[in-house]
Amino acid sequence: MAIANPAHRPRRPSAIVIGAGIAGLAAALRLARGGMKVTVLERHAHTGGKIRTVASPAGPVDAGPTVLTMRHVFDDLFAAAGARLDDHVTLIKQDILARHFWSEGGQLDLYADLEASVAAISDFAGNKAADEFRQFNARTDRLFRAFDAPMMQAATPRMMELVGHVLRQPGLIPAMAPLSTLSRMLERQFSDPRLAQLFGRYATYVGGAPHLSPALLSLIWQAEAAGVWVVKGGMHKLTEALTQLAMDQGVSLRTNTHVDRIIVKNGTAAGVEMDHGTTISADTILYAGDPCALATGSMGDDLKIVAPQTATLPRSFSARVHSFAATPSGPELAHHNVFFADAQRSEFDDLVAGRMPRDPTLYLCAEDRGQGTPTPKLERFEIISNAPPTETHTPPMDLDRWHHQIMQRMADFRVTMSPTPTLSTITTPQHFAAMFPETQGALYGQSPHGLTASLKRPTARTPIKGLWLAGGGTHPGAGVPMATLSARHAAEAILSGQTSTSTSARTAMRGGMSTA
C-alpha cells in the first residue's frame, strides 16, 4: 500500500483574525470549519469584545448587550460549525419583550405575542392607539421583509440595485417614508406621543437620535417582535461557548496580544506585527475591530485607503453603563425595563451637542429576571444611559453628580437599590475609548443619521488584497446579530476565493518575514 508523502500534502491556507469580539469569533469559527489554519489575536485578557462583564458579589454582571434577537443568525452560525446552539447555551424566550415606564402616564408591556401587545396598548392608550399599532406593525413587517435579503443578507448592497428593488414593489416607498425622519414618521403614525417616544427608542439601538435617523429604522422593531431570548447566565455565556467551539475546531487564540500594525507588501496584506516586534505571516488578515482604526492609520499608513469615510463621518452615540448587584424595591421589574425621559427631544439635543442629557431615558436590565428560575435576593443589574462619544481617556469630572442624578431619577419611578451602587461600577465613554482605541468611545461605529447612512458603511472586501473586515462598524451594521452576519459575509467571501488569495499572499511574503 502506498504511503502518502507528508511533504506533498497541500499547505492549509492561513488566516489571522484581529479581535475576538462576536464578529471575530464567528468568522474564525467559519474559517476554521472551511479548512483554514486560524489564529485569533485579542488585545484584552478575555474574548467577547463589547460583550463583557464586571465582577459583583452576585457574580459576573453583563456590561454590554443584554439579550439575543434574530436567533436564526446564531442557529445558522452553530450549524455551520456542525453544532447546535441549544447544546452550548441555554436560551429562554421572553414573553415580555420590555416593560416601559413614564413618570406621568403609566406603564406598558410589549409582548412576543402580537395580540397581547395590541390588548396591552388598548388598555394603556385606547382602541385608536391599538389600531395605529397594528398599522405600524404591518408597515414595519413589510419593510423588514423587503430589505432583509437585498440589504442585511447581501454582502455588498448597491444603491442602484436597491432602487430597482424598491421600484418593483408598489407601495414600499410610502412605507419607507424616505423624506421623513423616524420621529416625524412616528408622530404621524401615533396619536399618543408616548408610543411615538417608545418606538423612537429603536434609533438608539444603533447609536442614533430619532429626529435625525431615517424612518426606515422603524423596521428594527421587527427584529425584537420576532423574539427576544435571554442567555442563561448572561450574554457572556454565548461568547464563551463560541470561544470553546472555535478552539475545538483548531483555532489558536492569543489573548493579551496587541497588534501594532498590519504588514502590507506589494499591495497585499501579508501578516501582522505585535507591539513587542514579533511578526506573524498569513495568507489572509481579517480585521474584526472598528474600521476607523485603519482609516486613521493607527494600524499602519498603508491602511488609510481602507474605509476612509469612517475617519470623517460622525460617530454614533456611546453610553454610561452601571453594572452592579443589589436588592431592589419598587415596581415589579421585567428583564428589560425602560424609564422614559419627560422631554424626549431635549435628551437628544444634548447628546448631539456633546453633552450628557439633563433628562435622560434609562434602560435597566434586571439580569436575573426572565431566567425561568426564582429571582435571588441579591440581583444583578445593568443601567444604560446614552452618552456622547469622546476621544479623551480622561475620567469625566461630573461622574459623582451624574451618579446621584441617575439614582434620584430611578427613585422618582419608586425604584431603589440596596446597597446603592458606587461610582466604581460605572463604565463611561472614556473607558470605552481606552478599551477600543480609535472608536472615540462610540459603541456602534459611525452615526446612523441620514437616509443613506447604512450604505456608507464599509463592506467586508477592502482595496488591499488579502485584507477583510467584519464587526459592528462594517455592513450590515451595529448590534450582536448584525456583527455576526458581517462575519458570515467576510468568511464566505474569503473561503470562496482562498486559493487565489493564498497564492497572492505567499508571493507577497517572499522577502523573509519571520513566522512566530
Image (cartoon, helix red, strand yellow):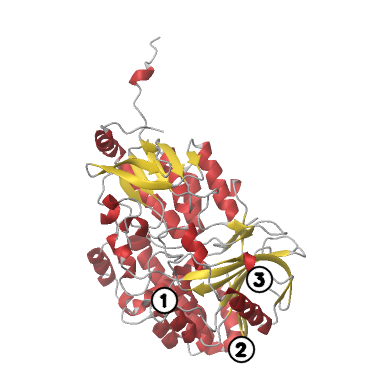
Q: The residue tagged with tag 1: helix, strand or loop?
A: helix
Instruction: Answer with left or right where residue 219 lies relative to residue 44.
Output: left
Q: Is residue 10 above or below residue 248?
A: above
Label 3 sits on residue: 334
Q: Examine the image and state in which quarter residue 171 appears.
A: bottom left
In the foreground, 97 or 411: 411
Counting the numbered discs, the total is 3
Please report the residue visible at 29 percent of the width from the left and 64 percent of the height from the top.
309
* Helix, strand or loop at mark 2: loop
Q: Quadrant of residue 210?
A: bottom left
Three-letter amino acid code at disc 3?
Answer: Ala
Which residue is the site of mark 2?
105
Circle nearer the viewer, 1 or 2: 2
Q: Is residue 167 above or below residue 31?
A: below
Q: Are marks 1 and 2 in contact (CB under 8 Å)?
A: no
Q: In the structure shown, which secondary structural element does the residue marked by tag 3 occupy?
A: loop
Q: Residues within 10 Å of mark 1 (few under 14, many from 20)?
A: some
| Mark 1 lies on residue | 139
Is residue 182 among what the camera can see? yes
Q: Amino acid at mark 1?
A: Arg
Give the residue type at disc 2.
Gly
Residue 478: percent from the left, percent from the top? 43, 63
Would you identify the image quadrant in which residue 14 lies? top left
Rounded to the nearest angstrom, the CA distance separating label 3 from label 1 is: 27 Å
